[in-house]
Image (cartoon, rainbow, N blue to C red):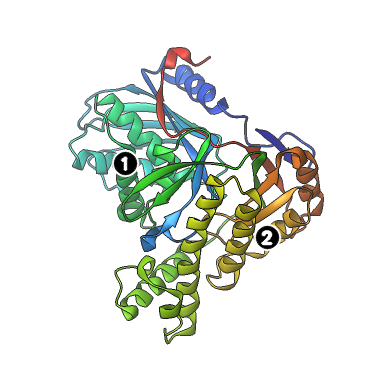
Amino acid sequence: MSTLSSNDEPDATPAPAAALARAVGLHRSRWGAPTLVARAPGRVNLIGEHTDYNDGFTLPMALPFDTVIALSGAGDPESGLVEVVSEGFGEIAIDPAGDPTAVEPWARHLAGVVAILAGEGVASGGWRAAITTDIPTGASLSSSAALEVAAITALIGRAGRAMAPIEIARLGQRVENEIVGLPSGIMDQFISAGAVAGHASLMDCRSLTLTPTPLPGGVVIAIMDTGTRRRLAEVAYGERRAACERAAAELGVVALRDATVAQVATLHDPVVRRRAHHIVTENARTLAAADAMRADDAAELGRLMSASHASLRDDYEVSGAGLDAIVEAAMASPGCLGARMTGGGFAGCAVALVDATSIDAFTTSVIDGYRFEGHRATVWSCAPAAGASLVDPDAVA
């Protein structure tokens, strides 16, 4: 993976695997050697946006950016306090018997994991941990899902239990829905838990399956950070989801996955009709993108990604000026086959499919060409990474 930013200085996001060493080092400096280390990656979604909570299809891949938890026991595993030092957010103590929604916002993901696992019979109290991350927060790369998945992976490992990726993902989604209060789908946690290195994954959000799908040959994925961050996007997210549910109810289908373009055209409310049109066409684009990947057709994959951005911008209305600006800069750059916003939208990152031989020229062109309210672009080129895992603490330098 390579990283460049528009201020010609080292990017604030460390190199892959750096979070492992920092987490172990931070734990050692506070409490001595950790007994267990878990990591979970962020993700970028290549196509299939806002389809997950409509029982649809997505095509994400895990990134070589990790959130890492280095952990050791401290007191009663059933009820003992949880002491955490976070590289980015400071320190906190979590009472397993307390209200997980009452802690600081960043720590609700951890307190939620403690509460949800306790309800599942997994001893989740009495530990100390150092947490570090290489995932830019608020950039639509699923830093919160990675934190949830890393914490669940660590605590079930400490309890000597094993869970399939979908079980871990369901628990993480419950944290988001029940504790954090965001009515999100399962995509972020599922790919963080179950990704296969070197592959994106076609995710069926109804049957809850992941099908590893290789990228076409001769291309790389470029992640482009606009430097903008979401504010108050949760309200808009809830409105989009409610519109989809209204559309499905009016059409008499379980979810918009089951609707057709012709049916959507009969919806009475023009806003609801546009939202539903995005979902139905995005599902079709995602399945076609997986076919293109299997056929080694990079040009078609890129075309579909660009069409997805237009739909998210015009029908679902979750793009933003910064995202549109960086997608335009990408499409005007050497070697770009397609580009789109990624994640929930409004701000954060976009993703591009780029001819591997042109990645340096592409990166320079995007950095030079992106202009939005004084923000500077950062571009990472990367390959698909593996999902969450436990790591031997003694193997971390």
Q: Earlier in the sequence, mark 1 or mark 2?
A: 1
| Extreme residue in the left direction | 121
Quadrant in the picture for residue 35? top left
Q: Residue at x 50, y 51 (%)?
A: 290
Q: Residue at x 67, y 39 (%)?
A: 218
Q: Amino acid at mark 1?
A: Val
Measure the C-alpha gap from mark 1 to mark 2. 33 Å
Q: Position of residue 238 (x, y in %)?
A: 41, 67
Q: Position of residue 154 (x, y in %)?
A: 35, 29
| Extreme residue in the bottom direction | 268
Pick the front one: 274 or 353? 353
Q: Residue at x 62, y 55 (%)?
A: 300
Q: Position of residue 76 (x, y in %)?
A: 21, 26
Mark 1 or 2: the one toward you: 2
Residue 113: mark in rendering:
1
Q: Mark 2, residues whose alpha carbon is within 10 Å: few (<14), some, or many (≥20)?
A: many
- Image position of 227 (left or right of 396): right
Pick the front one: 279 or 39? 279
In the image, residue 235 sits, relative to residue 3, either above or below, namely: below
Q: Amino acid at mark 2?
A: Gly
Residue 322: mark in rendering:
2
